[in-house]
Image: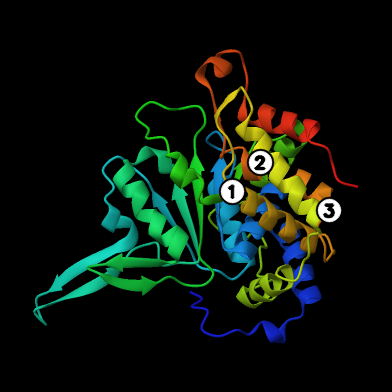
Amino acid sequence: MTTGAGDVSGSVTGDEARDALLALRREVAKAVVGHDAAVTGLVIALLSRRHVLLEGVPGVAKTLLVRAVAAALSLEDRRVQFTPDLMPGDVTGSLVYDSRSAEFSFRPGPVFTNLLLADEINRTPPKTQASLLEAMEEFQVSVDGVPRPLPDPFVVAATQNPVEYEGTYPLPEAQLDRFLLKLVLPLPLRDDEIRMLGRHAEGFDPRDLAGAGVRPVAGPEHLRAGRAAVSRVTARPELLAYVVDLCRATRSSPSLRLGVSPRGATALLLAARCWAWLSGREYVTPDDVQALALPVLRHRVAVRAEAELEGVTADGVVSGVLGAVPVPR
């Protein structure tokens, strides 16, 4: 597990970091078919030290995607299956009494990793969901009043099943706002599904990523160099105004009961800067903002119940805002 003790980004240039992170998609594709956009989203989350919601029906390779990204980045990953009886200490860790020393010692939970897969996060009660908030926002866990830092990088990839809501606990808006992106993993295209079945017919084992040929092509040093490079990506005042206008337009939409907060505006700018750098530029364009608007904003708006009955969706509202707000030249 990477602990991030020191900045070694000086040993890797920004161009080298970009090339390595772009090669990640080819490496993950050895195990996962047809989810290049989701791989890019996870890279953006790792670059920005933010978190991701993955939504898709069962069987679209959400877990395999996270494991493959971790393997290609030489990162430690852990998986927590969220259930109604899961306790906060099962995630963050807890104090355990040692009868030999007659003292309590801290036993770290699965949150002490680089890439945490929170599987079906909406199946656990709000108290356990909230146990992730400090970890996600402060990159530390406090147990018995003692703060314990998490590794660097640390990113939560939380999955949700969009078709099964019985017995679930929807994430509150305040917690949804902590996720930089909401990535929707669709069912594969016919040709992609045929390729996937062909791999299984040839003996592909999703539990054996090394056997599938997935090798580390980047590491934490490339992420640190990438973060340093992203921090130098510029955005002109007209671009900043465009981001603000997009977010403000959602607040006045008659179809929404909740629009995008100022935190959402900063998230959109951050994601656009990461995408601009991955695209080989040191400045943000309106196209960068538009490319990331849906995954950044779709979970930060709440559609009115009566609008939902008429078929209005969050994606539809955000797309409408993108079409209505003037684009800077």
**Colouring chosen for the image of the structure:** rainbow
Horizontal side, residue 285 vs residue 89: left or right: right
- Position above or below: 287 against 3: above
Task: Specify few, some or many for label 2: CA neighbours under 10 Å numbering under 14, 14-19, or 20 or more.
Answer: many
From what the image shows, is residue 66 above or below residue 198? below
Q: Disc 1 vs disc 2: Cβ atoms closer than 8 Å?
A: yes
Residue designated by label 3:
285
Image location (x, y in percent) of residue 73: 62, 68
Mark-to-mark CA distance, 3 and 2 = 17 Å
Tag 1's secondary structure?
A: helix
Q: Mark 1 or mark 3: which comes first in sequence? A: 1
Residue flagged by tag 2: what amino acid is it? Cys
Residue at 29% across / 46% down in the picture?
Answer: 127
Circle 3 crowding by C-alpha within 10 Å: few under 14, some 14–19, many from 20: some
Q: Would you call the spot at circle 1 few (<14 residues within 10 Å), some (14-19), or many (20 or more)?
A: few
Q: Say which amino acid is labelled 1.
A: Pro
**Residue 321 position (above or below residue 309):** below
Check disc 2 and report the residue beneath it.
247
Tell me which numbered mark, 3 or 2, is placed earlier along the sequence. 2
- Give the residue at mark 1: 262
Residue 109 seen in the figure = yes
Where residue 280 appears, as percent x and y from the top left, is 84, 64
